[in-house]
Image: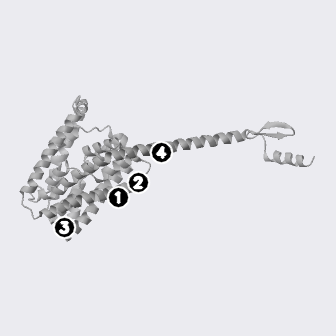
């Protein structure tokens, strides 16, 4: 809850207005993250479970992880370090975070069907108290208290550290609970699940990059944002959501374990890709700038040639008369030609 309060208090609403113009791109990222990844992971998780590669609890955990939203902090860190569009990343993460409160439970119930023995009404009430209320409380505090916005901007790094400490504590408690509760999953199944999570993450990243290349080929900064926005999943909001949905379920720890694999994997892969993506963005922008300058130069040259051609003089009866638009008609040209041929 404390992490959610600081998330809302540190949120700059005025920075989101400029990024809203890219709503088509943001819509694509959100749809891919929610529906695309969950569909792919659901298919493979069911296949792994039927072939006894993972247990039922781990299969459910993989599907639950795929239904979560992108993390705000990690998105910004990876986007900035990769020379992406920071404003668009912030806007997409903020919108998706608010949507995930309502979309994630629906997706989980949709994929798991009647196996998810959860009261939907109680779930949304718990989510509202644990997630929505703290976030909006932080937003209200920032907007209403005099000097709060400047205070938040000056101590942005401090709030980030506090949020990270809260997140580490939540992850630690969840990790401990995972292995203290009894489970039917074997060690080999847990290892197989971890390997499958990493492979699926790389797979959906490759698909996202190809699709982004097709749609946003001349927008390298947006492609970087899309690459991370399409595949990253949050623990700061994910664990409270999972805890709210499966509050009294003794298998809660195993349901969160796939998320604890996906999150560090995306952080490691993103860190490895960041310098390469920065070089990619710089190369593409230089290339497009040179192409633009070449087109402008070519256009100016064509305009200069056309102007010079219009100013070339023609000889009429021994006189040199500059030809300007509207000075000589086609009939005059024909009469002059006939006179020249018949002296």
Relative image position of residue 283 (x, y in whole percent): 43, 44
Name the N-terminal-most of marks 2 and 4.
Answer: 2
Give the label, 3 or 2, closer to the camera.
3
Q: Nearer the viewer, residue 111 or 261?
A: 261
- The residue drawn where x is 89% and y is 49% is 341
Residue at the bottom extreme, as displayed = 51
Relative side of 25 to 182, left or right = right
Alpha carbon of mark 3 to alpha carbon of mark 2: how far?
A: 34 Å
Do the numbered discs 3 and 1 sit on residues whose CB atoms are within 8 Å?
no
Alpha carbon of mark 4 to alpha carbon of mark 1: how far?
A: 24 Å
Alpha carbon of mark 3 to alpha carbon of mark 1: how far?
A: 24 Å
Q: Nearer the viewer, residue 23 or 50?
A: 50
Q: Quadrant of the N terminus?
A: top left
Q: Nearer the viewer, residue 30 or 55?
A: 55
Residue 288: numbered disc: 4
Residue under numbered circle 3: 53
Alpha carbon of mark 2 to alpha carbon of mark 1: how far?
A: 10 Å
Disc 1 secondary structure class: helix
Disc 3 secondary structure class: loop
Task: Look at the image and tell me whether residue 225 can be seen.
Answer: yes
Residue under numbered circle 2: 213
Name the N-terminal-most of marks 4 and 3.
Answer: 3
Residue 207: numbered disc: 1
Alpha carbon of mark 4 to alpha carbon of mark 3: how far?
A: 48 Å
């Amino acid at each position: 809850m404390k992490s959610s309060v600081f998330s809302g208090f540190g949120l700059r609403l005025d920075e989101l207005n400029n990024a809203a113009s890219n709503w088509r791109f943001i819509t694509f990222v959100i749809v891919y993250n929610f529906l695309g990844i969950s569909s792919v992971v659901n298919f493979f998780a069911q296949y792994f479970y039927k072939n006894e590669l993972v247990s039922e609890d781990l299969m459910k955990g993989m599907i639950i992880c795929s239904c979560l939203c992108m993390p705000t902090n990690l998105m910004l860190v990876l986007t900035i370090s990769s020379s992406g569009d920071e404003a668009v990343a912030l806007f997409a993460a903020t919108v998706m975070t608010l949507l995930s409160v309502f979309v994630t439970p629906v997706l989980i119930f949709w994929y798991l069907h009647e196996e998810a023995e959860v009261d939907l009404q109680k779930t949304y009430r718990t989510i509202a108290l644990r997630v929505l209320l703290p976030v909006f409380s932080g937003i209200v505090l920032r907007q209403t208290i005099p000097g709060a916005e400047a205070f938040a901007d000056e101590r942005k790094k401090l709030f980030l550290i506090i949020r990270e400490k809260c997140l580490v504590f939540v992850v630690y408690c969840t990790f401990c609970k995972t292995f203290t509760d009894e489970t039917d999953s074997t060690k080999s199944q847990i290892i197989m699940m971890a390997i499958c999570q990493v492979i699926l993450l790389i797979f959906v990243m490759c698909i996202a990059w190809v699709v982004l290349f097709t749609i946003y080929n001349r927008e390298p900064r947006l492609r970087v944002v899309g690459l991370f926005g399409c595949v990253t999943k949050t623990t700061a909001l994910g664990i409270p959501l999972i805890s709210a949905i499966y509050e009294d379920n003794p298998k809660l720890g195993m349901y969160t374990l796939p998320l604890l694999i996906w999150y560090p994997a995306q952080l490691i892969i993103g860190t490895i890709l960041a310098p390469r993506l920065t070089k990619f963005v710089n190369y593409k922008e230089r290339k497009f700038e040179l192409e633009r300058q070449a087109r402008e130069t070519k256009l100016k040259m064509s305009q200069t040639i056309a102007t010079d051609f219009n100013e070339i003089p023609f000889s009429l009866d021994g006189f040199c008369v500059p030809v300007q638009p509207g000075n000589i008609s086609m009939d005059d040209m024909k009469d002059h030609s006939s006179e020249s041929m018949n002296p």
